[in-house]
Image (spheres, helix red, strand yellow):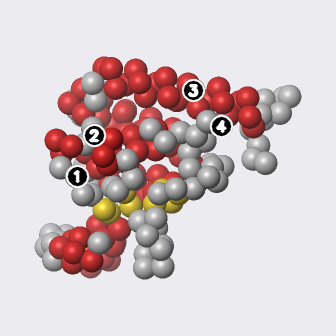
Amino acid sequence: IRIALTNTSRKKLAHEDMAYNAAVSSLDQLQMDFTDEKDADTSDSKTKDGIFAGLTWFYTFWSRDELICLKAFMFRKKYSFVKKVLTKYIDNILPDGRIPNRLPGSELGSADGIGWLFVRFYEFLLLLDKEKKLFTLFTHKKLVDIAHKIEYSINNILENYSDKDGLIHNH
């Protein structure tokens, strides 16, 4: 991790606004991306790529924090990284329909993380479609797989967390 942070901090920033450069540098230092583009679809990167929250106190990926921050990576056109993070969570949907509160390892599901996952996936797919890059990053088969996982999640959340009026709650 120290090597990744050191290499990131050496990058030259082109923008003239010091506050902007500081924000970009901070964001880059929280990004851990250890796999190559060609390895982006392998299950080997399930939990090692992401955005740390809470450095230097702990080294885990908190689902809600990571998914909220992911929009900044979309703006910066780091599409391969965005894809890795989104697929990491879609591949870790818990039996109750939620995603883990943090990775690696947590039996506690995130009450709102799954909602952030759905929002970010929706925004990402719209962005890629608009830029005519959707099918360069996702195969049709992968998109169908993602749709099935989202459907699985919604069905299980409704079964496990909705009341008689259909309101979703956390217990």
Give the Cα distance between marks 1 and 3.
28 Å
Of the residues under marks 4 and 3, which one precedes in the sequence? 4
Q: Label 1: few (<14), some or many (≥20) within 10 Å?
A: some
Residue that carries the numbered disc 4 in the rendered image = 96
Q: Amino acid at mark 3?
A: Tyr
* The one of 75 and 114 positioned closer to us in this rendering: 114
Residue that carries the numbered disc 1 in the rendered image = 35
Q: In the drawing, does residue 56 fall left or right of residue 152?
A: left
Disc 1 secondary structure class: loop
Q: Amino acid at mark 1?
A: Thr
What residue do we see at 20% from left, 30% from top? 136
Res. 142 image quadrant: top left
Tags 2 and 1 touching, CB below 8 Å: yes
- The N terminus - image quarter: bottom left
Q: In the drawing, does residue 104 fall left or right of residue 156?
A: left
Residue that carries the numbered disc 3 in the rendered image = 152
Disc 2 secondary structure class: loop
Q: In the drawing, does residue 35 fall left or right of residue 166?
A: left
Of the residues under marks 3 and 2, which one precedes in the sequence? 2
